[in-house]
Image (cartoon, rainbow, N blue to C red):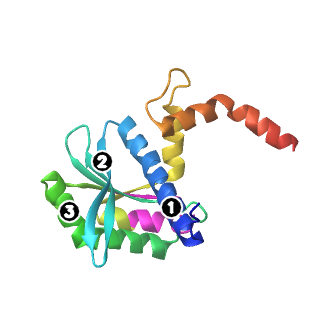
Amino acid sequence: MKTLSPYLVAVEYSLAMGNFNEQIVKQYFELKGYYLQSDVKFPVPRNYSDIDLIGFSSGGKPVIVEVKGWHTTSVGKALGVGEIDAFLKNERMWKKAEAYLGKSRTEFEKVNVFSELGKDSREAVKKHDKANGVDVLEFPEILVYLFKNTETGPEPSSEVLQMVRVIKQFGKTIIGVLKKE
């Protein structure tokens, strides 16, 4: 039996969690009528990177979405603004996005998704983003939308919606048990 190094296990876990965050965000946009592809790769020196989500709105407008699912902390002003600036200035990513959809970057709806912006930085980051043509979403608003718009009835079309459905179905029971412990 082959053993994996702790480093490789950590990398695999990180990739799986990153993809799960992107799948949550993708499901949010799909429920709103978007058509998206995830993990569109492009080369960078000595490696590759990827566009988290890219596609079209229901009205045909191209959209590109960057997902930052850092759920252990809120995002401060310097990091939030820095991430937006890096997103807007990533020439390799924009060349790939323009070639992939056949549209100019000026036509794209640009969205940056953060786990949660810090209370003291939320307004500053959103103001900076709006001035640069970038919409900002946070995971709490995405999750609330998913919970409000996911039925507990028939089998859902994705693993994300299945997870939401199960939590909606059994959440009160789980919370009750946890409160007793």
Is residue 125 found inside the magenta-colored segment of the image?
yes
Is residue 110 found inside the magenta-colored segment of the image?
no
Taking the spot 48% from the left edge, 50% from the top edge, the residue there is 20
Is the C terminus in the top left, top right, bottom left or bottom right quadrant?
A: top right
Disc 1 to disc 2, C-alpha distance: 21 Å
Camera-near label (1 vs 2) is 1
Structural crowding at the residue carrying mark 3, measured as other residues with C-alpha within 10 Å and reported as few (<14), some (14–19) or many (≥20): some
Q: State the SS at label 1.
A: helix
Amino acid type for the residue under numbered disc 3: Lys
Q: Earlier in the sequence, mark 2 or mark 3?
A: 2
Q: In which quarter of the image is residue 85?
A: bottom left
Amino acid type for the residue under numbered disc 2: Gln
Mark number displayed over residue 96? 3
Residue 82: where, in percent of width, then height?
A: 40, 75
The residue that label 2 is drawn on is: 37
The residue that label 1 is drawn on is: 12
Mark number displayed over residue 48? none
Q: State the SS at label 3.
A: helix
Disc 3 to disc 1, C-alpha distance: 25 Å
Q: What stretch is highlighted in magenta?
A: 111-127
Q: State the SS at label 2.
A: strand
Looking at the picture, tell me which residue is in the foreground, 97 or 81.
97
Residue 1: where, in percent of width, then height?
A: 59, 60
Looking at the picture, tell me which residue is in the foreground, 147 or 130.
147
Residue 24: where, in percent of width, then height?
A: 47, 46
Camera-near label (3 vs 1) is 1
Q: Do the residues labelled 1 and 2 touch (CB within 8 Å)?
A: no
Taking the spot 47% from the left edge, 28% from the top edge, the residue there is 156
